[in-house]
Structures are given as C-alpha cells and as structure tokens.
Amino acid sequence: MARSGAAASSPASVTGDGARSDATSLTREQKLELYYFMRLTRSLEERLVNLYRQTKVVGGLFRSLGQEADAVGSAYALDRSKGDMLSPLIRNLGSMLVQGAKPNEIIKQYMAKGDSPTRGRELNIHYGDLERGFIGQISHLGDMVPVMAGVTLSFKMRRQNRVGLVYVGDGATSTGAFHEGINFAAVQRCPLVVIVENNGYAYSTPLRKQTAAKQLVDKAIGYGIAGEQADGNDVIATYEVTKRAVDRARSGGGVTLIELITYRRKGHAEHDNQSYVPAGEIDRWAKENDPIDRYAARLNDEGVGAPELAAIDARVQSEIDEATDEAEASPMPDPTDALVGLYADPPAVAPLWFRQGIKSAVEVHERPASWGTHDV
Amino acid sequence: MSEITYLEAIREALFEEMERDANVFCLGEDIGAYGGAFKVTEGLMAKYGEERVIDTPISEAAIIGAAAGAAHMGMRPVCEMQFIDFISTGYDMLTNYVATARYRAMLPCPMVVRGPSGGYVRGGPFHSQNPEAAFLHTPGLKIVYPATASDAKGLLKSAIRDDDCVLYFEHKYLYRRIKEEMPSGDHLTPIGKARIAREGRDVSIITYASTVWKALEAAEQVEKEDGLSVEVVDLRTLLPMDDDAITATVKKTNRVLIVHEDTRTGGVAGEITARITENAFEWLDAPILRVTAADVPLPYSPPLEDYVLPQTSDIVLALRKLAAY
C-alpha cells in the first residue's frame, strides 16, 4: 500500500481494492487503442516541445510525461456513446484525446491560432466541446468540481443515463471549490466521478506540505462517498477502477473519489527547472515506472509483438506531422475578433473610440523584440 | 387585478417562469421547505418538488458553479444568495468561470444569481451590502437592480430568459414596502433599458434601486419649495448601461446628480460620470455631483446607518446646489 506522501520519493506499486490489473474485460483491440492514446499523448507533447523551442508556442507548455496512463485509462472508462462528459486538468491531454480532441486543435491552441477551438482566446489545452463530451478547465484549481457537479445534476434531473468525470490534482484538494463541489455532488448523489491525480507535486509544493491526510482517498470518508485508490501508472488498473466508479454512478450509486498515484516527471510547466525535486527521484520513476514502458511490456507478454506497436507509433507520428503542418499554416486571429462573442446579445462589444476603424492594435515594427514569438 | 408587493412580484416571476419552462430550477440555502430567509420562494417547492427547488449546503461557490454546469447543458438555473452579501464567496466562480465561459470556450451560461440586497434595514455590515460595483467591472456579466414591483417581476423574467448570466439584485427594504398592480400578460422588462421615473426640466437625478424612491421624494420637495423641475432616471440595468438614456437626460436638463446607496469610491456613479464627460461634456452647465454612502462598512446602529446612507435631505441639498450653480 503506497501512501501518497511517499509517492514523490519512490515509485509506487499500488493497486487499490480489487484493482487487479491482470483482470480486465478489455478486448485486444481496446488494449491497443489504449496504447495508441498513450503514445499519441506523449508524442504530441514531444512535438509541442519542439515547437516551443522554435518559439512557435506563444505561452507556456505543460507536460504530462509519466502520467499518460492515468489520463488515458480513466477517460477510457467513460461511455462516449451514452454522452458521458469529463472536465480535464492541465495534465489530461490524454483524457481529451480519448474523448475526441484532435492533435491539430491542441497545436493550434498552443500556437494561438485564429482557427483554434477557442479562436485564440485561451491557452494550451483549455478548451472543450460539449458535443464530444469535454468541458474546458480554467486555471483556478478545483473550480471544475462544482461545474461538473452541475453538469451531472442536469443528467440526473433529466433522467439521462450519463456520467461525468472531473480531474483534480493533489494540490486542488486544498481548495474551497473542491470541497464545496464534491460535497454538493455527494448530497445530490450526482453521477460524478472525481479523480484526484496524486503526482506528488503542486507546482513545487510536495504533498506533505499540501495536506496532513495520510492519503487523499481518505477524504472520501468525510464526504460519505465511495473512495478507491489505484496505481495511476498502470493503464489497465486505472481503467478498471474508473470503470467501477462510472458503473456505480450510472446505476444511481452517487459520487466516487478515486486517488490515482502517479508522478510528475516534468516541471509544473516547461520553464520549471525542478530544483526542488530530490536528486535521482525523476530518473528512478522514468527507469522503473514509466507507464508506456510498463504497458508495452505487458502487451508483449500477452502476445502483441513489437512490430505491431511500432506500427502504432508510426501512425501516431504521421498524424502529428499532419496536424503540425495544418496548425503552422493556420492564420493568427483577426484582432477585431477580440470583441466578438462575450454575450449572446449583444453579439459584439463596440470598439473603443481610439480603435474605431482600426484593424490591429500593434504594427509589427512596434512589437518589442522580447515578444519574439509570432511576427505576423 | 390586485396590487402585489415587490417581494410577491419576484415570487410571481419565479412561478411563471418555472411553469413556462421545465429547464428553469432554483437552488439556494433554505429556499425549499422553509421558503427562503425572506420567504421569496415560499410555495415553490410544494408546487415543483425538491428536484427543481433545491436546498443546498452552505456553499455559494458550489451553488454558482453547479448552476453554470447545468446551464451549459441547457438548464436555466436561478441561484439564491441568502443575503447578497454572501455573493462574495462565489466571486471566483462568477468572475473567472461564469463571466468568461462564452467568450473563452463558447459555453453558454444562461443563469440568474439573485438575492436580497441593500440597507436601511439595520442589517449591519454583512446583511446590507450593495455589491454591484464589484461586478460592474466584470465583462461577461449582466446586472439588474429593480426599483419597482413591476420591474422586479419583468426584469426577473427577462433575466431567466437571457442567454447569459444575470445578477439580479433585489432590494430588501422594498420587499414589502411598495405595492403595484402588475401589467397583464407575460410581463417582461427589457434588460439594458432605463426608465424615466419622473419627467423634469431643470436637474436630472440618475439612480437605481432604493434611492429611486428617495430621489422622487426629494424631487417632490424641491418642486414644492423651490419650483424646481427634477427628472429622475431609474437605470434598472447597470450592465449593460443605458448610455442613450443617460445622454438624453443630460441634454435635456444640463445638470446631473447621481445617487446610489452603495459606497462612493469606485462606485457606479464614478462610471456614469466618466461616460457623461466622454459623451456629453459640452451639454453640462454644472459639475456632476454624487450623493452616495460614505466609504465605510455599513454600521448597525440606527443613528450610524442613517448617517452613512444617502437620505432624501442629502438629495435635496445636492439638487439646490446644482440648480444654483
């Protein structure tokens, strides 16, 4: 049994109650799909790092290296045909890809393109699509818990057979919004699954400075809801534990809190040098507990040959290449689009008097060199 | 048809809108079985059940956040803040999440946050607030603050039908003190449109909510005692602000007094003043004056509260000063 407090110092080997990762009903095809999404997550982020270094990413870059299994496995437990919805966190690119987010959208978001899903208004993976079943997060941690409580409350009120899933990190469990949202959802018995991804750090703050709780799953007791813990770096265990919670929610059993033990191998964002991490810790997790390596080995044991996985890797690469080309060719936003769509009515905000008849605020020559990122 | 109070008008709007649209539901603290701290929602749960009239935990952030989530899915939630003073604990959800949702993520938030607001009731610092200025600064929200019973009904019905989040402030001093016969039929007051509460030629008072009544009293007094003709503009909606109505009254009287119950610094009056100087400076024959609360938390004891809040006599003084300028 891994304590979350220890998660940061040594690779955890956890499987929660009954989360035996060797027992799964997933088909061979589904298992390969899990591999595909994990690989797509990692490779897409690697591509974004390249673009970041080329200064083509306008803002910061957030990685989920080492957490791909928890994102992909948990989201995979939702039923897209039933209209299940999730709200991701910054390290849930994998969850969004499972729900149908496309690599070209992600790259366009990072590059602040005019045809990105948010038309250049929001950064990185902060976007959503109600049709495909994901709702974009905001930066204020914990806020998506009340929102998803409301989404799932609407499922219940309308007698819809749908389930919601919301991700928070270990840090967000300290927020008021997390507490209020999960408590309200628990009282209302909303069909909601709350996944706490315990990756050891909130920015630079280790879990022991975040909470005095022995493990985050213990918080479920206080809310009177089901709680389970699983090894977040085992994609099958992650899928199974989430599937149980999803089934529970769908059958009227209310909210479940799941703690997934994982580890954040990169800094909070790309700029973070991780000076606060004890020497050797990251390397140890990379060597001993990489979710994709572990899963590839498992698939290998189950008779999936290396060439088959290599073929998936190649497919992922070509999809990312294609997405990159499309994103790079995409236009930046029309500056005046900034005034459109704040309200349904009126449809646009009036330009300020000093901008009337002016199409852009800053001429290229006015831009400080330090902006550097996108002279267009 | 008989007259009903401001409070009954709010209740009538809730009943009518819940009857009209199954997506409308209410959530808040003690609003169900108990009928709300002021009994605004009395009878609502008996008629529509506890699924559509939800008694929540004491969790303003959850009330507002959950309303937003439900609104994304096509519901039309009406949140009650037990006292509007408590809206501050939902400030993050409102300003960061709700107000930005459509703009940043194309997520609709058709929801209303309503609650008893304002002073003159000896409520002390935490049961008397007027928080409109804190939200006037947030693009993406709409703010209405009715002064009359018919506007209380008409604005709430419009707010519930609006496709964005509307903050609906209702003045608790007015709850049971004013009565009016409701216009017949499906009565809607347009959001964003001010009302001329009293026509006049010499000086304009621009105001809203409880101080509309004090402005009207003062106008009567100076007409009688000084022969002044005072126009009173009831803004009704603060966001978006009705610039046309403001400019029109400035051009008509050329003298402007802005009155509000909220504190002075950073208040709504400052914004109105700036707009007038931008849009109609050359029409002014006198400096714009403000009568507002003093910049202190609202104290409890009657002599203190009366001293801090704007009174009719303050408005009379200001009107005379403007007329003499």
Image: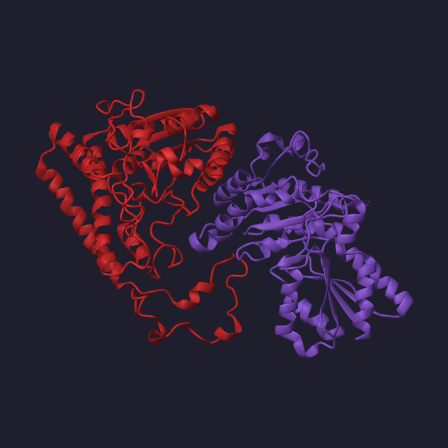
Chain colours: A red, B purple
Q: In the image, what residue occupies the spot 25% across and 32% down?
A: A235
Image coordinates of residue A347 in percent, x first then y, are 51, 61
Image-quadrant location for residue B49 = top right
- Number of residue marks: 0
Q: Of all residues shown, which one is farthest toward the top?
A: A18
- Tell whether A140 sits left or right of A13: right
Image-quadrant location for residue A64 = top left
Nearest the viewer among B8 and B36 is B36
- In the image, residue B175 sits, relative to residue A13, either above or below, namely below
Image coordinates of residue B25 in percent, x first then y, are 59, 39
Image coordinates of residue A262 in percent, x first then y, are 28, 34
**From where the camera sits, is residue A83 visible?**
no
- In the image, residue B221 sits, relative to residue A80, either above or below, namely below
Image-quadrant location for residue B191 = bottom right
Image coordinates of residue B265 in percent, x first then y, are 64, 59
Q: Of all residues shown, which one is farthest toward the right?
A: B225
Nearest the viewer among A182 and B195 is A182
Q: In the image, what residue occupies the spot 41% across and 24% down?
A: A226
**From where the camera sits, is residue B19 visible?**
yes
Q: The C terminus of chain A appears in which quarter of the rendering?
A: bottom left
Q: Of all residues shown, which one is farthest toward the bottom?
A: B282
Q: In the image, what residue occupies the spot 33% across and 29% down?
A: A4
- Tell whether A217 sits left or right of A61: right
Q: The N terminus of chain A appears in which quarter of the rendering?
A: top left
Nearest the viewer among B123 and A90 is B123
